[in-house]
Image: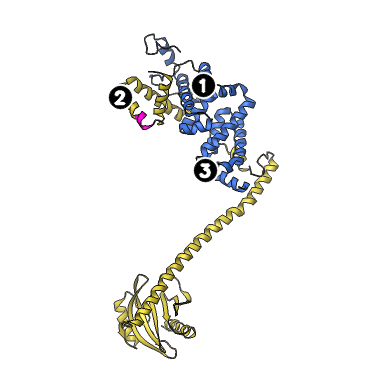
Amino acid sequence: MSDDENWRRFELLALPHVDAAYNLARWLTHNDQDAQDVVQEAVVRAMRYMGSFRGDNARAWLLQIVRHACFSWLKENRPAERLALDDSDESLQDIAAPATDEPHSVAMRKADRLQINQAIAALPAAYREVLVLRELEDLSYNDIARIADIPVGTVMSRLARARTLMRDALTPVARPVLRTVPRSTQAGRTT
Amino acid sequence: MKSHSDAQQVNAFVDGEMDLASQLEMEERMRQDAGLREQVEGLRQLQETIREGADYHEAPAELRKRVATLTPSKPTARSHRADMAVAIQRWLGWRPTVASFGLMAVLAVSLNLAWLRSSQDDRLLDDVVASHVRSTLGQHLVDVASSDHHTVKPWLSSKLDFSPPVNDLQIPDSVFLGGRVDYLDGRPVAALVYRQGAHVVNSFVWPSAGKDSKPSFSAERGFQTAHWSQAGMNHWVISDVNVEEFKAVVRAVQLAEGER
C-alpha cells in the first residue's frame, strides 16, 4: 500500500478521532503541550501501521496507539507514574485503595467541575485510563481491554476501583461519618 | 456477599456490560436487596456526575494543524520550513487526486445517465419497430384512411390529448395513407402513415417535454429509423426504404412541420 493511500485511509478513518486521542493523552500526561507531542507521535506511528489496520473500530485502534505513545512518554518523563501503570492490580490496591470496594449508599452530592477534574487527575494512571475511556469515551469493556492491553477482567477490577476512589474523593464529608459509626454495615470489614 | 467480584458485577450492570442471564439475575436480586439497589443507584449517580462534570479535552487547533502537516513521506518533519514544504507538497500531491476522484464521480454519473437514456431509447426503438411491423403485417395500417390531412388531423385530435401535425410530404413518390392511434413510450401517440414507392413509412408523433434535437438515425433489423424533437413534439420515423430515400423522407417530415 502506498504512502498516499495510507494517508488517505488515515485521513478518512483515524483523523476524526483526534479529539479522543488528545483527550486520552491530555488526561494521562496532565498537560496540553505534552499531550500534543504524544498525539503527534502517535499519529506518525498510526500512519506507519495504517496498512495493518483491518478496518474495524478506528477509534479504539487509534487510542491503542495513543495509549502506547503515552506509555513511552511517561516512561521517559514520569518514571514514578509509569511504575503505577506497570504494577499489578494487587499492589495498586495496597497503595491506592484504602477504602472498600463497596459503593457507598450515601447519595453523592453534586461535586463541582474543578473537584471532579482534580479527583480524576489524582487517580493512579492505570485507573485514570480506564475511567476516562469508559466515562468520557463511552467505550465498551472489550474496547478498553484492547486499548489498555489488559484482560477484560482487569478492566472490570480497575474500573470498580477507580469508581470507588472517585466516590471517596467526591464525598469527603460522608466518609468519616461512615467510618466512625461502629454498627454500620461496614463495621465488620477490615480494609 | 460484598466481595470484589460482586462490586465488579454491580459496575458491569451499570455499564450495561452483562450478558442477559446475569442481568436478569441481578435485577431479581435488586428486587429483594435494598442495599444492592442503593449501590446501583449510587454508581449511576457517580457515573452521571463524572460524565457531566469532567472536562473533555478536545484537540486544540494547533494540534490539528500539526497533524494536518504530517505526511507519509516526511512524518518526523518538525521545523516550520519543513512543515511548509510538506504542506505544499501535500497540497500539490492531493489536489489532483481529489480532482480526479471528483471527475470520476461526475463521469460515472453522466455515463450512468447516458446509459439510462440510451437504454430508454433502445426500448423505445424496439417498440417503434414492433409497432411498424404490426402495422404492415396486419390489416390495421390506418384507423382513418384518407389522403386528406384535413380529415385525418381532426380525427386524431379527437382521439388524443394533443393535436399532431399532419402534412403531405413534398417529395416524389410519397402518398399520404392516413393515420391511426398507437401506443408508445407509455402513452397514446399519433401514427401517420405514408407510402414511399412500395414501402410503408410510419411517422409517430407525441408531445415532448424536452428541448428540440436533431434527427438521430439508426438501422434496426433492416428498418431505417430516425427520431428527433421539434416544436415540442417527439418524432419517430421508421421505414424499410433505402437510406437515401429515408433521409429524404425525414427531411420532408421536418420541413412539413416547419411550414405548419
The chain carrying label 3 is A
- Residue A89's tag is 1
Q: Give me the C-alpha separation between circle 3 and circle 1.
A: 32 Å
The residue positioned 61% from the left and 53% from the top of the image is B95
Judge the density around disc 1: few (<14), some (14-19), many (≥20) Cα neighbours within 10 Å.
Answer: some
Marked residue chain, label 2: B
Viewer-proximal residue, A158 or B37?
A158
The answer for how far apart the CA atoms under marks 3 and 2 are is: 43 Å
Q: Tell me the residue that label 3 is attached to.
A: A55
Q: Which one is in front, B18 or B86?
A: B18
Amino acid carrying label 1: it is Asp
Pointer 2: what residue?
A: B31
Circles 3 and 2: CB distance less than 8 Å? Answer: no
**Palette colour of chain A:** blue
Chain under numbered label 1? A
Q: Does A139 appear in magenta?
A: no
Residue type beneath disc 3 = Gly
Kindly identify the amino acid type of the residue bearing the numbered disc 2: Arg
Looking at the rendering, the stretch of residues picked out in magenta corresponds to: B19-23
Please tell me which residue is depicted at 48% across the width and 62% down the height of the picture.
B112
Image chain in yellow? B
Residue B92 appears in view: yes
Instruction: Measuring from the top left, give residue A14's x and y in whole percent.
Output: 55, 41
Which is nearer the eye, B156 or B18?
A: B18
The numbered mark, 3 or 1, whose residue comes first in the sequence reads: 3
Residue plotted at (40% across, 27% down) = B44
Q: Are marks 3 and 1 in contact (CB under 8 Å)?
A: no
Q: Which one is in front in this view, the residue at disc 3 or the one at disc 2?
A: 3
Confirm whether circles 3 and 2 share one chain: no
Q: Where A115 falls versus B204 (above or below)? A: above
